[in-house]
Amino acid sequence: MTNISERLGCRLLAALTLSVVLSSTIQAASAHEANKRVADANALVSAPQSTQRPVARAEKGPYYVDFRARTAASWGHAFVWYGKTSERAVEVAGLTPKGDTLSYVLGHLTWVPSETGASYGDLDPDYLTANYRVYLNETDAKRVFAYIKKLQANSPVWNAETTNCTGFIGDIAEYMGLKVPYRWQRPENFVNSLKEINGGRQMVRLSAE
């Protein structure tokens, strides 16, 4: 009877011991898994920026020249907007015949006096047919803007076949180092071609003087 009691006591003790061991093992495993998840979460939050997918950004400067074309009574008109990106005000430059319809008609036969500022429709987005905006840093912008002013001051006449609006903005594009398409074409076609042959590049840096 004593042997049976002893054997039962040993088995009960062994069972209790096994239960305690299993319980401790399970708790330790659970704690380890929980710690691993916390560590993984912390690692994800503190991951360096280099592991994140970079965001593509178009390079832009604080100044711009915008080559533009709009509708007109005949072939249309090409001109430029230029200024600072942080300001709403824009400067406008283009080459047009000075005066009324008669000046425009005569300008197909000979040279007539010109105007080089904003003309009717240049500021109205409803007339716009094409544009190509190029950005500049401050140093280059000062040079380009000064060139535009000089070009305005030295363009006293207009002629439909020689000294016209596409030729005028083509001179500006060439000064900026852009590739310039055939100039004697419709303003809309000229601006679109200018953008195409330059690969749509947005930032221009002038060469050293």
Image (spheres, grey):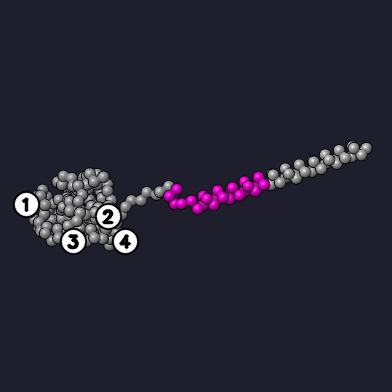
Dot 3 or dot 2: first in sequence order is 2
Residue lying at the far right in this picture: please name it: 1
Tag nearer the camera, 1 or 3: 3
The quarter of the picture where residue 1 lies is top right
Q: Which residues are magenta?
A: 28-51
Image quadrant occupied by the C terminus: bottom left
Residue lying at the far left in this picture: please name it: 110
Question: Could you give the CA–CA distance between mark 1 and mark 2, rounded to whole angstroms?
Answer: 36 Å
Q: Tag 4: residue type?
A: Ser
Residue linked to disc 4: 86
Q: Residue at x 27, y 47 (%)?
A: 200
Residue linked to disc 2: 135
Q: Tag 1: residue type?
A: Thr
Q: Which mark is residue 110?
A: 1
Dot 1 or dot 3: first in sequence order is 1
Question: Could you give the CA–CA distance between mark 4 and mark 2, rounded to whole angstroms?
Answer: 12 Å
Q: Residues within 10 Å of mark 4 (few under 14, many from 20)?
A: few
**Residue 34 part of the magenta segment:** yes
Tag nearer the camera, 1 or 2: 2
